[in-house]
């Protein structure tokens, strides 16, 4: 909501608030992945098998409410390497805010 309010008030601004919103949400996702690494490693249940099949690319959906947090937690629990997790996590968060900012910008014009 803060991004929307800022873009509505300062319609000439676009990239800085977009990057700040992406950074903040990505940091939250990183904390959730880290918390997942604190969970005990056990056998992968059948419900999580599709995560193993698709890998870190599923984190592009990390922006989806509730599901995104579960995906980040699962990424940590499955001990996926950070070098594969971070790009997809950032991409998912960035695309979300880019779409939001672009739609608000379209409304303003």
Image (cartoon, grey):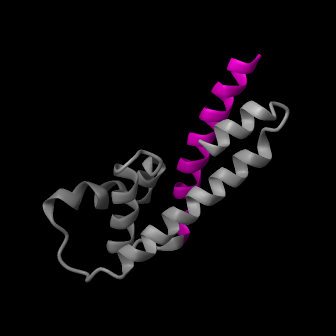
Residue depicted at x 57% and y 60%: 26
**Displayed quadrant of residue 36:** bottom left
Q: Quick one: quadrant of the N terminus?
A: top right
Helix, strand or loop for the magenta stretch, by majority = helix
Q: Residue furthest right?
A: 12
Q: Nearer the viewer, residue 75 or 97?
A: 97
Answer with left or right where residue 23 lies relative to residue 35: right
Q: Quick one: quadrant of the C terminus?
A: top right
Residue 87 visible? The answer is no
Residue depicted at x 43% and y 59%: 56
Where is residue 38? Give x, y as percent: 35, 82
Tell me: residue 56, above or below residue 97.
below
Residue depicted at x 19% and y 70%: 44
Where is residue 51? Give x, y as percent: 30, 57
Count the labels in the image. 0
Residue 63 visible? The answer is yes
Residue depicted at x 52% and y 57%: 89
Where is residue 73? Give x, y as percent: 36, 66
Answer with left or right where residue 57 lies relative to residue 88: left
Give the residues drawn in magenta, as a range: 83-109
Answer with left or right where residue 30 lies relative to residue 76: right
Q: Is residue 107 magenta?
A: yes
Q: Is residue 106 magenta?
A: yes
Tell me: residue 84, above or below residue 22.
below
Q: Nearer the viewer, residue 11 or 41?
A: 11
Where is residue 5? Give x, y as percent: 68, 37
Q: Nearer the viewer, residue 98 or 55?
A: 98
Q: Residue furthest left?
A: 46
């Amino acid at each position: 909501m803060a991004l929307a309010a800022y873009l509505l008030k300062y319609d000439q601004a676009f990239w800085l608030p977009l990057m700040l919103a992406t950074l903040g949400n990505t940091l939250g996702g990183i904390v959730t992945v880290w918390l997942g690494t604190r969970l005990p490693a056990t056998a992968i249940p059948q419900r999580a098998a599709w995560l193993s099949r698709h890998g870190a690319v599923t984190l592009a959906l990390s922006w989806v409410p509730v599901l995104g947090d579960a995906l980040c937690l699962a990424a940590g629990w499955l001990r996926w390497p950070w070098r594969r997790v971070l790009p997809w996590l950032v991409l998912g968060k960035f695309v979300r805010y880019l779409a939001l900012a672009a739609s608000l910008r379209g409304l303003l014009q």
